[in-house]
Amino acid sequence: MKKVITYGTFDLFHVGHLNILKRAKALGDYLVVAVSSDAFNAIKGKKCAIPDTERMQIVEAIKYVDEVIPENSWDQKIDDIKNHDIDVFVMGDDWTGKFDYLNDYCEVVYLPRTPDISTTQIKHELKLK
Ligand code: C2G
């Protein structure tokens, strides 16, 4: 069984998130998604509109997703890859190069982002209403 993992905040879940999960799953048979905790997002300097428990529930309900784990720090990825027996690590290409060190542990794939949609854009548009 080919296992895939990806990481993200998935705040205000949108089609860009759906596309990357769909395409990540297509690279294997089982998709693990690590969803950033609110505490970790504070470290990332991201303020979420939706709390981590709800963001995890939403991601868990996506048919491409087989398992959801919390992301609590930048440096849990190697352990996650080992502990979950991961074959492929996937991220959107805004992260290109940032996770190449994981090539020692699994295949690293960067996929093109979905254009014209982002959590930041949604928040901005809501402010303008
Ligand atoms: N994404 C995408 N297209 C968009 C928006 C997002 O493909 N229009 C992808 C991102 O590239 C990322 C995933 O969706 O792979 C989740 O995006 P975010 O929730 O913004 O996650 P991020 O803040 O990038 O956190 O350790 C890694 C971090 O947890 C990634």
Image (spheres, rainbow, N blue to C red):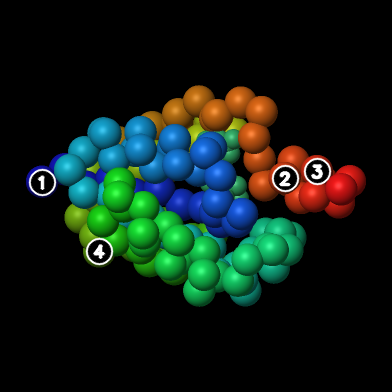
The residue beneath circle 2 is 122
Q: Earlier in the sequence, mark 1 or mark 3?
A: 1
Residue 59 is left or right of residue 31, and the answer is: right
User: At label 3, which amino acid type do we have?
Assistant: Glu
Q: Residue at x 80, y 50 (%)?
A: 126
Name, please, the residue furthest toward the right. 128
Real-space CA distance between mark 3 and mark 2, rounded to the nearest whole angstrom: 5 Å
Q: Nearer the viewer, residue 50 or 28?
A: 50
Report, in whole angstroms, how far the alpha carbon at label 4 lies from the one at label 1: 15 Å
| Residue 43: quadrant of the picture | bottom right
Mark 1 or 3: in front is 3
Q: Residue at x 45, y 61 (%)?
A: 58
Q: Answer with the quarter of the image where residue 27 lies.
A: top left
Q: Is mark 1 within 8 Å of ligand 1?
A: no
116 sits left or right of 109 in the view: right
Q: Nearer the viewer, mark 1 or mark 2?
A: 2
Q: Are marks 3 and 2 in contact (CB under 8 Å)?
A: yes
Under mark 4, the amino acid is Asn
Measure the alpha-carbon separation of dots 3 and 4. 40 Å
Describe residue 122's horizontal placement relative to residue 8 as left or right. right
Amino acid tagged 1: Met
Give the residue number, with chain letter if any, for mark 3.
125
Crowd band around label 2 with a 10 angstrom C-alpha radius: few (<14), some (14–19), many (20+): few
Q: Which residue is mark 1?
A: 1
